[in-house]
Structure formats: structure tokens, C-alpha cells
Amino acid sequence: MLNKKSMVKKSIAAVCLLGCAGVLSAKPKKYKTVQPELAVTELAPVERKASKPGEGVYYSLFVRSFADGNGDGIGDFKGLTKKLDYLNDGNDLTVTDLGITGIWLLPIFPSQSYHGYDVDDYYAVNPDYGTMEDFETFLAEAKKRGISVIIDMTCNHSSAYNKWFIESKKPDSPYHTWYRWITDLDFTENGGVYNRKQKGLAGNIWTIDLSNPVVDANGKPVLDKSGQPVMNYYAGLFSTNMPDFNMDEPAVRSEFKKVFKFWLDKGVSGFRFDAAGHIYNVAEVKPGSETLTKAVEFWKEMNAYVWEEKPDAYNVAEVWEPSATRARYMGGMQSNFHFDLGTLIPNIINNQEINDRKNQPEDMDKSSYNGFARSLAGEYAMYARNNPDYIDAPFLSNHDQPRSSAALRNNPAKIKLAADMYILAEGVPFIYYGEEIAMKSGADDPTKRTPMVWKPAGKDKLTPTWCDSGAYGNVSVYNKKTVPVSEQENDPDSILNHYKRVIRVKTAHPALYKGRLTPVPCDSAVLESWVMECDEEKAFVVHNVSSVKDVTVPLPEGCDMPMVYAANPAAKVEDGKITVPAMSSVVLAQMK
């Protein structure tokens, strides 16, 4: 608990991050029943109705940086298990937990790297994170709390230290066709079709294997026209340490199905498919090859298998491509991450602030109103053409992107509004760990994956210290002024407590967690609004993106319903009109 003396010592920046409002309370309130009326304007318990793996709100976390359960400085399964009650304690009558319904774990497999995306063994857990028993205990405790767990699955590539790849270096090995191998003779200068200098995402795609020159039937080296030994090369789009699989090989597909079953049997609820858009990357296949259709069919086959084993599984894919391409992939996917919202939403909020400062009048061209809602609806329509049962997965930032607080100028009001704008859209939103306390980062990847800020520095034994020194010793500098969980929990106006509120309204209303979005404009250029509707319920969602203007407008036809959420308690609905305070959101909803 904070006292006045300790608060005075905090920097102005830290105080502002708490929201610059509210009175600290010594203990959270205790409730005997849910309080939906109270929850309209403050943090209060509500009945969570989202219960399936493909419903609710997910929390993406890096085990290494979340919580250290054994004191070795590295986050692990034991630490994560101890912190589960922070995420969801399983009790709808409490308000001390964040309230998420699902967890996406970044890679948990043995790996040569700190991040884990180069997998050494798909049937084991990273010993840095604990034992398989520790993982199983974590899964059991998550299940007790109603939390679904999905794990990162890298099907595009493995580690160069994976036994499959090591075996594949032998041309006569059954594993040779598991990866994309070619020889010098396959390059264009030797009459082949592949470009030796083709670039990937981190240098040349094709890497020479010096350990295994090509040999003839007698075991003698094959020579090229210049008399040089012909060498073998493998494809690695992301790194020389990440050789790419050949998904045309049926044995690889079969093996990954075994991998899926292994983890589903352990109790995971599905998978996040890493680099799903690169399975048949045009840079490493024969020129003229049709890649997109093959990729969609591949993912359709993989998802179908997962659902055979677990009918309610939730799988989400990383297809970091323009929306039209993401829509095509939705034909083989259940859910895709909605990239670029972390740019679009801050741009909307920041640009409106500029207009407010210039005191510019509202655009009188009403055809331009509600642009964000119309943009979302347009993308959803493309998804639906490829998969009527699609589930969108909106997010602001992830482990590969700078944290969203920077784009929002570290402004608490903007951060809260941005959270509402993506969490209250369609689908299953993904919160990146630390987003709920406005953690910050730099541009380098390690700075985006630093330890969770639980308490002031040195005050929490569960805080990982793996990047306090050594090669990553400077990456945590960005969060020296981040207000920790322990302090934000006690401020009713903190960013953390705002996230608790919007997560609760999302998971309590079927229209919000499984409904479809229809843009419904209001008579104002600064309001973004839409209807969310499912068989059981209808909701009207409206956001005021102005930094200064409270707006009162007539309610659209059919939207005069009870208020269930007001980010600012000054919001009101009366006489067929709605008042939305500046930089805040309102939700009206009613069961059918």
C-alpha cells in the first residue's frame, strides 16, 4: 500500500501514468454477489459468460520474463503458476484479477535462443522453464480458474540443432526431404531455377552445408564445370539457424499432427501458428509456383486435424500480411491476428488531438464519419467470404513490435481509449503482457520482451532478472519509470484497473465476445460507433476520440438500450440521446 510520503517521492511521469486521479484504497472491496449496475461506472464484479477457448480475452506472455519461481533469474512455469490469480482467480466475485479467459504462451520448447522460436525438440519443454511436470501443474491450475491455454507452434522452421534437421543433412536419410535442400546445380548460373543471392528476412535464404558435399553412387564428390565440389544448401527464411520445413513432404505433415496431439493430450486448448504466412514462401520455391492456395490447403488440413482431436480447440495464426492476404488465409484458418490496429488506432486518436489543438471544425461531409468502424467491417466482410465462421484476433502490439504505449505518447487517457477500441471490436482480443500497466520498449526485440514490472525494483522475488546484466543488460532501461502492478492495483483510476473493467464487460456480454459488427454512425465526426449482435444479445458501442469535446447526439434507431459500461462516469443516456465524454467509450446492451 502507498502512503502520502512515498507518493511524493514518485516522479511526475510515474504519477501521471497512474491516471492523475482517484484516491488510494487500502483493500479491494469484497462482494457477496455480482454488481452489474455498479460495474457500469467503476470496477465491480460481473458474471463472466465467455467460457469456450474461442471466446473472451487472451493474454500473451513470455514465460522467461513473467515470473521466476525458483530464484534463478529466469521466468518459469512455477512462477507463472504462482501468478495465475493475477490473471484470473476463477472467482467472479473478486476484482483483484485481470479477468482474462485465455493465455497464449510464447515458445516453451528447448531452444538455443532466448526467444525460443528455433525449436530443438517439439516433444519437450525448455529446461530453463522447468519440467514437464511443472508445465502440467500449470495447465491444471489454469483449468481450475477457467483459463484456456494455447501454445506457440513453429511449423515453418525448426532449429538447426533439431535432430530432424541434423539427420536431414544426409542425402540418403528419410529426413532429407523434410527440409528444403538444393545443390549448386539448382542455381540459375548452373542451369537451375533458384537464385543463389535470394534474400530472406535476415540475409541470404540459401545456406551452404560444408559438412556434406554432394557425392555420386560410389561415394565420390560430384564436381561442377569448374571442377569445384558441388555442395548442398538449405533454405532459412528467418535465419541460418532456422532451417525451413518442406511441407510438400507427407511425413512432415504427419509428424506435426503427432506433435499437436501430444500437446492437446497434455491439456492445451489450441495453438498459435507462428509465421503461418511463410509455409510456402515465394522466395524459396520454384519460380511460377502457386503458393497461396497450397498454404491455405495446408492450414485447412492442420486445423481439421486439431478439431478432430479437440472439437472446441482455438487456433490463431500469424499472417503478417495486408488484409486481403489475411482474408485469403482465413479460408484455411479459424482465426488470424488483426495486424496494423496498433498503428491505426493510435493514429486516429493522435490525429484527432492535433485537430482539437487547432480548434478545427468538424468535417461536414458525413460520408467520412465512422471511418474506423467502416474499415473494420470491410475487413470482416473479406474474412467472411473465405470463412463465414472466422474469428478475428485484434491486438495493439506483440513480442515483435514496439510496445503500444509509445505510439499513444504514454498518455493514460489515450492508452485507455485505445484498449477499449480494440477489445470491444469483434473476436478474441490479445493483450500483450505488461500492456495493462503501460510497459514500454525500444525498437530491438529483446526490449519488447523484458520482465513484467510487479513491484518497485528489487521488491518482488518473483521478478525475473535474466536481462539485468550480460548480453541483455541494458534492455530493461525503458521500464525504470513504469508504475508497477502493486501500485496500480491500489488506484481506481489506473490503467490496470481500466483494463480490468473493459475485460469484464467484454466477457460478460455475448454480443461483445461472439457477436458480429455492423457500423452504425452517430451524428458526429469524432464518434466511432457500431452495433455488435448475436442470437442472444444486441450491443451498441461508441467511442469519442476527441481529446476535448464531450459529445451529445441522438441515439441511432434501435440502440436505445441500458448502459452497461461507461469508461467515464459522466456518460449518460436520456431522452433518446447519448452523451459520451471526451476520450472515452460507452456500451449499451440488452438481451433479446
Image (cartoon, helix red, strand yellow):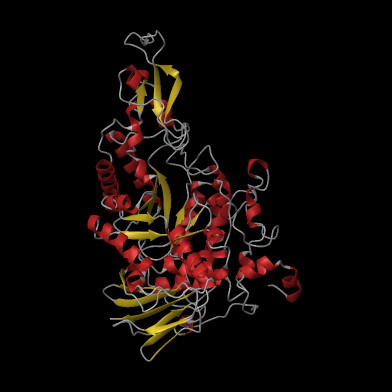
Quadrant where the N terminus is found in the figure? bottom right
Nearest the eye: 517 or 189: 189
> Vertically, is 184 above or below 112?
above
Nearest the eye: 385 or 101: 385
Q: Quadrant of residue 28?
A: bottom right
Answer with left or right where residue 377 lies relative to residue 584. Answer: left
Nearest the eye: 335 or 576: 576
Picture coordinates of residue 527 (x, y %)? 41, 74
Quadrant where the C terminus is found in the figure? bottom left
Q: Residue at x 46, y 58 (%)?
A: 343
> Vertically, is 204 above or below 525?
above
Q: Residue at x 33, y 22 (%)?
A: 188
Q: Is residue 346 visible?
A: yes
Q: Residue at x 76, y 73 (%)?
A: 5
Answer with left or right where residue 530 lies relative to residue 417. Answer: left
Q: Is residue 48 visible?
A: no
Picture coordinates of residue 567 (x, y %)? 49, 77
Query: How many marks do you count on the picture?
Result: 0
Q: Quadrant of residue 574?
A: bottom left
> Vertically, is 201 above or below 32?
above
Picture coordinates of residue 332 (x, y %)? 27, 50
Nearest the eye: 470 or 73: 470
Picture coordinates of residue 341 (x, y %)? 42, 59
Answer with left or right where residue 64 lies relative to residue 241. Answer: right
Q: Quadrant of residue 422?
A: bottom left
